[in-house]
Image (cartoon, rainbow, N blue to C red):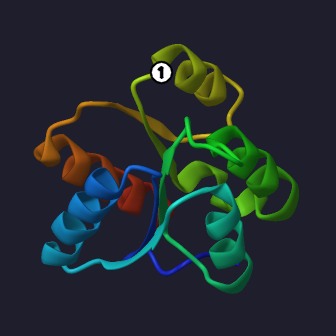
Amino acid sequence: MNGDSRKILVIDDDDSIRLMVERVLRRENYEVDGARNGFEAIEKLQHNDYGTILLDLMMPGMDGLGVLDFLESHRPELGRSVIVMTAHISAAAEARRSGKVARVLAKPFDLGDLIAEVRAAERAQSR
């Protein structure tokens, strides 16, 4: 089941980052859902399809690696649509090498880079 390429899930425990990213993407005419942690993310992933997932790795409770494990076992078709947003580049690079994520966006990031990465993920979905 492939998600609507214009529908995005933003997962980040930092409210200011998550809300800013959601606002920027809505201005670019994307449909956006947000989740504050891995548990909220999995709940949304069980009931919705997404074209792109923006995922913070370091969160309390269930972290981004837990979300990646869920995706790998329950929604493997979404793996190539995950963009990791993190300051922990070594963990993100390992996830990328393992094939669990499509792209890595280093925090702090430029909003133009964010939009470019989302558009690139959207193009990859249409292939």
Q: Residue at x 21, y 76 (%)?
A: 26
Q: Using the rendered image of the protein, determine whether residue 127 is visible from the camera's viewpoint.
A: no
Element type at mark 1: loop
Residue lying furthest top: 90
Image coordinates of residue 9 in percent, x first then y, are: 47, 68
Question: Considering only vertical position in the picture, is 105 above or below 34?
Answer: above
Image coordinates of residue 27 in percent, x first then y, are: 13, 75
Question: Considering only vertical position in the picture, is 70 above or below 105?
Answer: below
Q: Residue at x 55, y 35 (%)?
A: 58
Q: Residue at x 28, y 64 (%)?
A: 19
Residue beneath disc 1? 88
Assess disc 1: are there few (<14), some (14-19) or many (≥20) residues with their C-alpha within 10 Å of its C-alpha. some
Q: Residue at x 79, y 46 (%)?
A: 69
Question: Considering only vertical position in the picture, is 67 above or below 106?
Answer: below
Pick whichever, 118 or 108, lies toward us. Answer: 108
Pick whichever, 12 or 31, lies toward us. Answer: 12
Among the 4 quarters of the image, the one containing residue 100: top right
Give the amino acid at mark 1: His
Image coordinates of residue 125 in percent, x first then y, are: 49, 62
